[in-house]
Image (cartoon, rainbow, N blue to C red):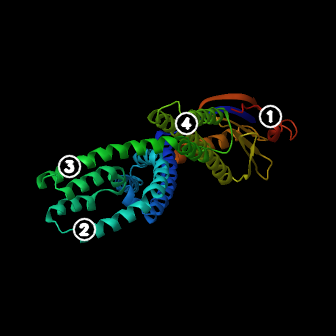
Amino acid sequence: MSRSYRAEIRLQKALREKLFRQRVRAKTGQFLERYQRIYASLCAQGTSDLLPEEMKRLRRDLDAIAARLDDDPVEARDISMSVGGYIHNLSSLARAAQEAFAQKEAERRAALQRERAAADAARQKVFFDALATMHPITAHFAAQEIDTLRQEIAAGTIGDSDIAARVEAIRQHAETQVAAWKETTCAEHQAEAVAAQVQDIEDTMPMQENAKTAELREKLRTIREKAAQAKTHTDDLQQELQAAEEEADAIAVSEDLRRACAESVVQELQALGFDVGCQLRDGIVEIYAQKPSGKRAFFQLAKNGKVQYTFDQYQGNECLKDIEVVTTKLDQCYGVHFSDERTLWENPDRLSADAYDVTNSNTMGRN
């Protein structure tokens, strides 16, 4: 007897969740390693002095990813996606800060030390103490107002008790300018940052194309164009990128599912004494197996979860026994079972070797 079936791969919820978590954990771990290298490079460049709050945030997020990676990879991924949304801008911001402020800050501190050493008025101590703790970029934007205050102190036109309050007011005004500079600088590099995030997602997608991957690539292309044209708010782009990354994970997990099923089929056929071969043709995984007696089995696993399998060159009902062994084992041991199973054809007699060539069967959809 020979039989051919068409069905759909279904995984038990626990196994599907396991594959998903494995996928997310591995990918997030790779991003964590990359972000840690970027962090170390930024530290070596002195970025912690120029952008201390941004660097503290990055350090906290990296620690949070590492702490959650094993037990809660999904939460770790979400934090990683958040980091991906700002780390590229942080690198651009760090380069701009180095170019614009690093040398000037060194010169400012050297001049401040000389002034403080030369000052003979105790009333100037508050002024110099405040300047010594002012953030480098803030000090740059506050420079003109600081010079004015310096002149007032020297001329005695400002009271001792008013110096600290005046310095604080200057600091607050300068910090609003710093925030505006950061926003403008990040906006100038938005297209570059989004393009890097899009590339990250594309790099994690399966190599084999199908309708879903083609649709996702089109979405990513649109996101890239929106960033280049600066027509979409950054927060909205980040939401679209997050949705695209989640979709990419789902596509990859589906491919992991097919791979797990294929590996399980191969193992069970080998356990039944089949010599097994496997190939990928036109996006379909084909598993072909044969026993020394001539009995044959052939499986086709499509990307959409559809599976077709054939057992032939059997006498009587022997093929039903092997079919039951394979499908039962897959269900019991691996959580893989076939739903919506339909018999395509059956032949109660033993077919001749050339009556049905399973290796040339091409009856499955390619999507």
Residue 104 location (% of width, % of height): 41, 60
Q: Report the residue marked by disc 2.
A: 116
* Mark pair 2, 1: CA separation: 104 Å
The outermost residue toward the front is 155
**Residue 128 relative to residue 110: left or right:** left
* Mark pair 1, 4: CA separation: 64 Å
Camera-nearest residue between 147 and 289: 147
**Residue 55 relative to residue 317: left or right:** left
Residue 96 location (% of width, % of height): 48, 53
Q: Residue at x 79, y 41 (%)?
A: 313
Q: Report the residue marked by disc 4.
A: 227
The kind of residue on which mark 4 rests is Ala
Q: Residue at x 54, y 44 (%)?
A: 197
Residue 52 location (% of width, % of height): 35, 56
Secondary element at image label 1: loop
The kind of residue on which mark 3 rests is Arg
* Mark pair 3, 2: CA separation: 19 Å
Residue 166's label in the rendered image is 3
Sequence order check: which comes first, mark 1 or mark 4?
Answer: 4
Secondary element at image label 3: helix
Sequence order check: which comes first, mark 2 or mark 4?
Answer: 2
